[in-house]
Each structure stands twice: as structure tokens, then as C-alpha cells.
Amino acid sequence: PYAKNALAAHGMCEETLELHHDKHHQAYVTALNGLVEKNDALKGKSLEEIIKLSHGKADLAPVFNNAGQHWNHILFWKVMSPTAGGRIPGRLEKKIGEDLGGVQQFKDAFKAAAVGQFGSGWAWLVLAPDGKLKITKTPNGANPLATGEGKALLGCDVWEHSYYLDFRNRRPDYVQNWLDKIANYEFAEAQLG
């Protein structure tokens, strides 16, 4: 929802966005479309239905991986902003304080989840089924929709292609920058309902 160079001033260069969106994300879409085309049980299903149907099924692992990554990236593009990064609106800030102990505690826990995700994966801020905010992480293409951990409000991609051109192997710096300058907290607040 923004130009490919829109996040450059905030720590994500145009080349990263171009490769990430046009190559990586597109590859998941292309692969998923091919897999759905070969499986009559998947035809006509929504992306969310495909994720839930394929989660935890070894014979549908390629479907799940590509569907999960497609869903994750649809959210990823929305949870970043060239204009809203870093500012946490009042209602979300209040909820963060109530459920997670405050903004700094939230950022510390989110960063710990993102940095602590071994290998590829995601860190999430979710609205859990009990109505409380929760920080979680998932490996590879998994997500809170599949795991039932709640409604995703923010999702930070910690696959290396998300940050290697800009931060090399410094995942902690990428995550801190993402939280402070790129995360779209206005979008996250709107997801609270």
C-alpha cells in the first residue's frame, strides 16, 4: 500500500522491498496457485480455509507453507507504514499497558520473541481468544490463524530476506528498527475492533 522506496528512510531499502514483495511473496502465490489447481478439495476455498485445512497435515505441508506465507505477507505489508511507524495510538497503548506491562515491556518481549525464533519465522502481537494481548512467535510459514493463538495485530517477518540487505546478520537491530520506525500501530489498533 505504498511505493517500494517508501520505507527506505526508515531502514528498509527499495531493493529489500522489491525482492521481498516481487520475488519471495510472488513465489508463494505462484506455488500455492499451482498446488490448489492440482487439488480439487482446495479449489474454491478461501486462503484462510486452506490454511486451516492444511495445518498439521504432512501430505499438505507444501500447501500450508505457501498458503501460510502468502497470508503472513498480506498482513506484513499492512503492518508497516512510512508515516505511522513508532507512534502507538492511545487505545492500543492503554491495552498494551494493561496486558503487557507497558510499551517498553511490549517492545522488549516482542524483540525477544523475534530474535529468539531459531531460523526462519515470525514474531506476532495477537489479540488472544481471552481478549488479552499476547506476544508469540511461529516458525517458517506458520501463523496465529493456524495455531489458534488469536487475531494477528502485528507480524514481523524474521526470515533473512526481510533484513539482510539492510542489517546483514543483525536481526536484533532490524527488529528494534521495525518496532521503532516501521510498525504500523494505527493498523494494529484498528484490528482490536
Image (cartoon, helix red, strand yellow):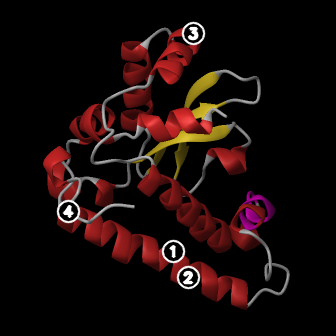
Residue, disc 3:
98
Residue, disc 2:
31
Q: Is the Cβ of the residue at disc 2 closer than 8 Å to that at disc 1?
A: yes
Helix, strand or loop at label 1? It is: helix
Q: Label 2 to label 4, Cα distance in Å?
A: 27 Å
- Whether residue 124 is visible to the viewer of this picture, yes or no, is no
**Disc 1 vs disc 3: which is toward the camera?**
3
Pointer 3 local density, CA inside 10 Å: few below 14, some 14–19, many at least 20? few
Residue bounds of the magenta highlight: 50-56
> Sequence order check: which comes first, mark 3 or mark 2?
2
**Disc 2 vs disc 4: which is toward the camera?**
4
35 left or right of 77 in image: right
Q: Label 1 to label 3, Cα distance in Å?
A: 37 Å
Residue, disc 4:
5
Q: Quadrant of residue 65?
A: bottom right
> Sequence order check: which comes first, mark 4 or mark 3?
4
Query: Secondary structure of the magenta portion, mostly?
Result: helix
Q: Label 2 to label 1, Cα distance in Å?
A: 5 Å
Question: The disc labelled 1 sits on which kind of residue?
Answer: Tyr
Pointer 2 local density, CA inside 10 Å: few below 14, some 14–19, many at least 20? some
Q: Quadrant of residue 51?
A: bottom right
Residue nearest the viewer, comparing 140 with 108: 108
Question: The disc labelled 4 sits on which kind of residue?
Answer: Asn
